Image (spheres, helix red, strand yellow):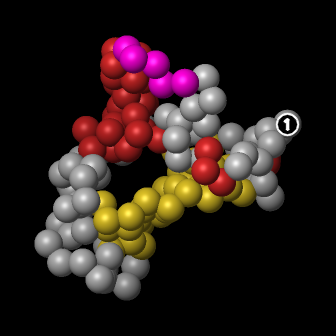
Amino acid sequence: MSDSDFYGFWLPFALTNGNDGRGRAWYSSANNRKKFEKVLRAQGFERVPFEYRVKVTVTRILGKGQRLWDSSSIGRGNWKEIEDSLVAVGFFYDDGPKCISETRFLQDDTQRENGPKIHVKIERDDKCTT
C-alpha cells in the first residue's frame, strides 16, 4: 500500500447490531472471533501488519429484506470480534489506538445483490505518526 492508496476488501460476513445484548459471558464472543478467523484463514486473508497507523471504514452491505439500522447501531454488534480476527490473521499488530486511530461505520442499501456482507477500507492516517 503506497502512501496515497487505500486497501479495500470484502468480508463474507453479515454485521449484527448487538440488539440481543453482548452478555456477561466472554466465551461466546471468543468463539465467534475464532469462527471469523477460521474463515479468513481459509480464504487467504493472512498478511503482514501495516507499519503505520490507519483509519478503517466498515460498510455494511445490506442483503435482500434487510433494513437500515440507526447509525449508532452499526458498530456495536459483532464488529469487535471481526476486528480481533483481522488482528489474529495479521492485518494489525493490535486493535488499539497506536495501530487504528479511527473506525467509521457506514451502510449501503444499493448493492443488495451483493449482500449481506461487509466492505472494509483501510487508509493510512497521515495525521498520525507511529
24 left or right of 114 in image? left
**Residue 5 x/y as whole percent:** 40, 79
Q: Nearer the viewer, residue 114 or 81?
A: 81
Q: Predominant secondary structure in magenta? A: loop
In terms of depth relative to the viewer, which is nearer, 28 or 89? 28
Residue 13 in sight in this render = no
Q: Is residue 73 above or below residue 99?
A: above
The span shown in magenta is: 21-25
Residue occupying image coordinates x 34% and y 37%: 85
Residue 64 visible, this angle:
yes
Decide whether residue 115 is among the magenta residues: no
What residue sits right under mark 1 in the picture? Answer: 65
- In this rendered view, identify the residue nearer to me: 74 or 42: 74
Horizontal and vertical percent for residue 97?
25, 59
Image quarter hosting the N terminus = bottom left
Please tell me whether mark 1 sits on a helix, a strand or a loop: loop
- Within 10 Å of the Cα at label 1, are there few (<14), some (14-19), or many (20+) other Cα atoms? few
**Residue at image location 40% in from the left, 23% down from the top:** 29
Q: Tell whether 4 sits left or right of 88.
A: right
Quadrant of the image containing the C terminus:
bottom left
Say whether residue 122 is left or right of residue 130: right
Q: Residue placed at 30% from the left, 60% from the top?
A: 100
